[in-house]
Image (cartoon, rainbow, N blue to C red):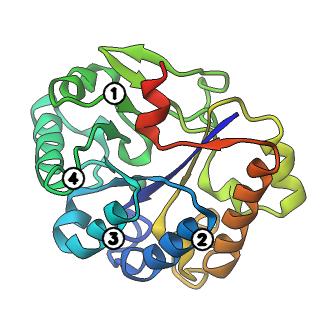
Amino acid sequence: MQVCITVDMEHDCPPFLRTYRGVTQGTPRLLELLSGEGVKATFFTTGDVARRFPDTIRSIVDGGHELGCHGDSHRRFSAMDPTTARQELHDATDVLRKFYPVASFRAPNLDFPASFLPFLRDLGYKVDSSEGRHKPGSFFKAPYTAERVRRVPASTAPSLVRLPRLIRERFYARMKDPVVFFFHPWEFVDVTREPIPIDCRFRTGEPALRTLRETIGFYRGRGATFRRMAELAAQA
Ligand SMILES: [Zn+2]
């Protein structure tokens, strides 16, 4: 069993907030936890966050984690025409590759039209994790290759991990290899009082850190190996 911990680095709970508490307060806590657990993760980052918080990006890379791309502005790709989408990818890639040889991508809201895959390929991307097994129509989707890009779906919504232990572990036991979790830095800050949907804000902050630690322990106890996204794709 292989497990990939991924983090979508963006401003707080888009499109509802415009703050960056997750980047400034959540990320250091998350990096400390991952370092303590000896787990290397993949951080899909917007160009916007990389331009505003270069020191945070450097701390991610210095921690041995993989830097990936999460678009430039966190707008939905399905709402863009091809020219805009190509520019969005180009702008993000440009800034992110100043920090790391970025080759993995995840679209905001797991929303990426297949017709845009050639843009990723042309920019040298090897992996796309913009699909989700928890989304209707993708329940049993295994990794596959299209346009020479390896598509590795996420396994579940982030909020599932914050459910009570017995409930979430029932889901974990049914997840298919490779298991791809995704989180957001703002989940590791207490946003329970923010005007955002309940599935975004419940059990954020300390409880979210605790459940991530327990989740790593759950899989470690079952002999799982933790991989960065590019490592997962390279085995294909
Ligand atoms: Zn996002």
Residue depicted at x 28% and y 23%: 117
Give the label, 1 or 4, closer to the camera: 4
Residue depicted at x 16% and y 67%: 51
Give residue 113's mark.
1
**Disc 4 Cβ-to-ligand 1 distance below 8 Å:** no
Ligand 1 - quadrant of the structure image: bottom left
Residue 77 location (% of width, % of height): 28, 39
The quadrant of the rendering that contains the N terminus is top right
Residue 144 relative to residue 102: left or right:
right
Binning the other alpha carbons within 10 Å of mark 3 as few (below 14), some (14 to 19) or many (20 upward) gives: some
Question: Which of 48 and 176 lies nearest the eye of the viewer?
Answer: 176
* Cα distance in 3D space between marks 3 and 1: 32 Å
Label 2 vs 4, first from the N-terminus: 2
Binning the other alpha carbons within 10 Å of mark 2 as few (below 14), some (14 to 19) or many (20 upward) gives: few
Residue depicted at x 49% and y 32%: 232
Residue 15 location (% of width, % of height): 38, 63
What amino acid is labelled 1 in the image?
Answer: Pro
Give residue 59's mark.
3
Verify CB contact (< 8 Å) between mark 2 and mark 4: no
Give residue 72's mark.
4
Look at the picture and state if 85 lies above or below 218.
above
Residue 160 location (% of width, % of height): 70, 54
* Cα distance in 3D space between marks 1 and 4: 16 Å
The secondary element bearing badge 3 is classed as helix
